[in-house]
Amino acid sequence: MRIGVLTGAGMSAESGVPTFRDALTGLWARHDPAELATEAAFRRDPALVWGWYRWRAAQVRRALPHRGHTGLAALAATHEVRVVTQNVDDLHERAGSIDVVHLHGSLFSSRCSDCGRRAVPEPLAAALADADEAARLPPPACSHCPGTIRPGVVWFGEALPTAAWDAALDVVATAELLVVVGTSGLVHPAAALPSLARRAGLPVIEINPQPGAIAEVASESWRCTAGAGIARLLERLDAGG
Ligand code: OAD
């Protein structure tokens, strides 16, 4: 079976990576997104923004993929599984998933804000034991031009990478099932993918402990965590469901 999986921050929550909007743990409970996740913020105070992404990348490097990530990777042995994620962490890849589309970029694809060349080696991949959330750090200079290296993530107000969005549309157009895991369904255009899938006649299963925008579109809503929901999905598919 051809399975599309759309994941959001809730997919990484069981690995200890905070979500965006969960009140208690949300990253932004302590920060104003306009203060950090925009190009204007980076131009205004590059050391603040780069330091925050360094902290987030160190948090992700310390995190481990959970059974939901490894379950999806294992599923690819018997089904065609394509993951479309809104997350900028690399937990799907570290669990073994091969076909992963990053709609909102990746913490580990820093590039020059002027010439666009990727920074090699990846400056945010370095193990940072002492990174703290408040540490300011000037971003590295580009080695090819006078520009400055920026995180390879999509900031508010920026367009999604065209290739990633086209790949996501292809997943919805060719899949036989869409599983939506751990997203509030509030940020477009990613949030439109489940509706596109339903209009294309695909069954859409939502996995999320909380009801939200996706519930209005899903064929089934499983009120459970990503790990438990993906285990249930594997059982259903094993049983030929
Ligand atoms: P949110 O923080 O908006 O939503 C996280 C969702 O995960 C919520 O619906 C939670 O109920 C759910 N959740 C929490 N714990 C879970 C668990 N253990 N298992 C399953 N679900 C769980 O994060 P996103 O929907 O991913 O965009 O946010 C989408 C985008 O908003 C992000 O990619 C980011 C942000 O603006 C950019 O940075 C461009």
Image (cartoon, grey):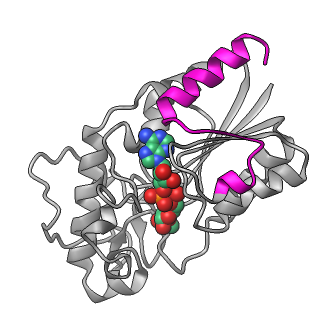
Q: Quadrant of residue 135?
A: bottom left
Q: In this rendering, is residue 232 above or below 185?
A: above
Q: Nearer the viewer, residue 151 or 186?
A: 186
Magenta stretch: includes residue 89: no
Tell me where residue 219 appears, x and y as whole percent. 78, 42
Give the residue displayed 72% in from the left and 62% down from the top.
192
Q: Is residue 227 left or right of residue 121?
A: right
Is residue 10 among the parts visible in the rendering?
no
Q: Is residue 90 left or right of residue 59?
A: right
Query: Image quadrant for the C terminus?
Result: top right
Q: Quadrant of residue 161?
A: bottom right
Magenta stretch: includes residue 237: yes
The magenta segment is 214-241
Furthest residue in direction top, as rendered: 239
Is residue 61 among the parts visible in the rendering?
yes
Q: In this rendering, is residue 75 above or below 56?
A: above
Tell me where residue 112 appears, x and y as whole percent. 41, 70
Tell me where residue 89 appears, x and y as whole percent. 42, 48
Give the residue displayed 67% in from the left and 52% down from the top.
215
Q: Nearer the viewer, residue 160 or 217?
A: 217
Give the residue displayed 14% in from the left and 67% down from the top.
134
Query: Image quadrant for the N terminus?
Result: top right
Give the residue displayed 47% in from the left and 73% down from the top.
155
Tell me where residue 34 appears, x and y as whole percent. 38, 82
Q: Is residue 149 left or right of residue 169?
A: left
Q: Give the total of numbered labels.
A: 0
Furthest residue in direction left, as rendered: 130
Q: Is residue 145 left or right of residue 70?
A: left
